[in-house]
Image (cartoon, grey):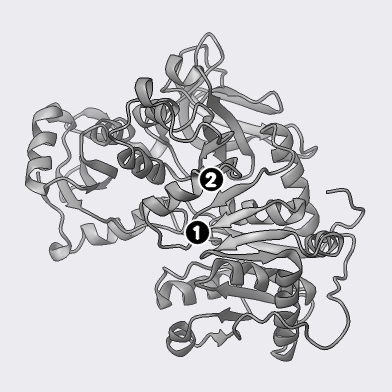
Amino acid sequence: MQSDNHNIGAIIADQARQNPDAVSIEQDGQRYTRGQIMTSAHALADFFRAHGVGPGASVGIVAVDRLRTFEAVIALWACGAVVLCLDCRQTIGELQAAQDKAGLDIVFTDSKSFARRGGMTLIPPRVEIAPLGTEMTFSDASGDSDALILSSSGTTGLPRYRRKSHRSVLQGLRASGAVLDLPVLPPSVSVGSLAFGAILMHWVKAFVYGTFMISLPLLYRTSDLHAALSRPDIEFVGLPPVVITDLLAFHSERCASADGCAYPHITRLSSIGGPISPDDLVRAYQKLTPHVRNLYSMSGVGAVSVLSGPDIEAKPRSVGRPFPQITVKIEDDTGAACAAGQVGRIYAKSNLMGDAILVDTGDLGWQDDDGFLFIAGRSDQIVTRKSVNISLTELETDVKNIEGVRDCIAFSALADGSLDDLVFLAVEARADGDTLKNTIRSSLASFRRPDRILVTQRLPRTMSDKIALAELKRMSTVKEAGFVDL
């Protein structure tokens, strides 16, 4: 990224000018060059301008085709707009609520259904014939104008939206590259929605640095992911924990000692978007690639620590040592620093950002004598029932270790007429529901068992493939939604 220009679109255009015939993206078996992608984006820019999009406009994109989404993002930057990528798996109501909350002027889509039912503007199909006019240009070389609207994608609370300028996005890429020792993204595989900030930043980095990427559709089979990861020209992938669990199930018959790792050529497999169970992390290290990594990160700070290499087997329940560029403080209820092994509230900041301040992560944890950081849970994941404290995080970890469980989440609500918390557990499993309930009853001590449980093959999920807690809490209040007494 050697450029004095701080506009992301201009840097991507420079990459295309330097080598227009270089293959940038492979999607659905078709390969697209940098020149083809910029030509398609150029045509979209003319289309957006014809629909009144100009400098300072706030625009949403909800597209099924992930490459088409990013072509639209590039085109909107050429118009001087700030962009919010939305998830096509959301309902019309959720998309309209996001439009209102993020203050969008207009939303475009490649889906005729969304255009018809949601009042969105339909964008034309991809073209590969250069439009009339001059080469695609980008103003604001300083990069001070807003480029992206990013939404929080956690399981708790409602999405929060924040705007980032071109300059701050590029600074973030450089900072994360320095912290993670990944200054340039290697050839990679991308899965997931561009509405998820980590996935969108993956695409931005690939285009800014001009590196090759395979883009899998939003709906894909594990065998499709396996085929992509098996290619010798692929070195990097970031996957949500639940997808790593699927890969482990796909390779369930593999014997690590006899068969070796499935993807020894993958130089980095990162778990992104949420905590992975310690057992799955160890199995991924043994069966998938020795270069698997579990990142602990937080909004406003970025990557805080990473667990990788032999440390995975030595300390699987930790999230690694904090990076040297990150300050981590753990304080008790009085604000005093916690001693090694003492659980407290975790605060962090990045020392790469000059004006950074300590941010409350909302997590509880401790550091051991070797400096490894352990997460005990979130402050709102300790509940009380019959005067006994219960860690919902530990409950989830134990249930995830039961054979046949793909994922789960626990949450609480106050019981009617009582000061006790009512504990709910939602489980996504391939196993028979009744058999799984009996296993949970027999394997958990009575004081730790959930009060109500839902077992299903598919739980609702957010744009980052996390379980949608807000939707489950709504379901827990509906008698017919599936939660039953355990």
Q: Residue at x 45, y 49 (%)?
A: 227
Question: If the image is split into quadrants, where does the C terminus sit?
Answer: top left
Q: Quadrant for residue 448, please give it.
A: top left
Is residue 89 shown above or below 309?
below
With 169 as the anchor, is 237 left or right in this view?
Answer: left
CA distance separating discs 2 and 1: 14 Å
Residue toward you, 269 or 49: 269
The x and y percentages for residue 243 are: 40, 46
Q: Which residue is mark 1?
A: 216
Contact between marks 2 and 1 (CB within 8 A): the answer is no
Q: Looking at the picture, which amino acid does disc 2 mark?
A: Arg
The x and y percentages for residue 130 are: 78, 82
Q: Looking at the picture, which amino acid does disc 1 mark?
A: Leu
How many numbered badges does the structure rendering display? 2
- Observer able to see residue 163: no
Q: Which residue is mark 2?
A: 231
Q: How would you rate the neighbour count of disc 1 (Cα within 10 Å): few for under 14, some for 14-19, many for 20 or more?
A: many
The x and y percentages for residue 398 are: 25, 30
Residue toward you, 235 or 3: 235
Is residue 65 shown above or below 471?
below
Q: Residue at x 62, y 80 (%)?
A: 126
What secondary structure is marked by label 2? loop
What secondary structure is marked by label 1? loop
Give me the disc on residue 438.
none
Nearer the observer: mark 2 or 1; the answer is 2
Q: Residue at x 50, y 17 (%)?
A: 310
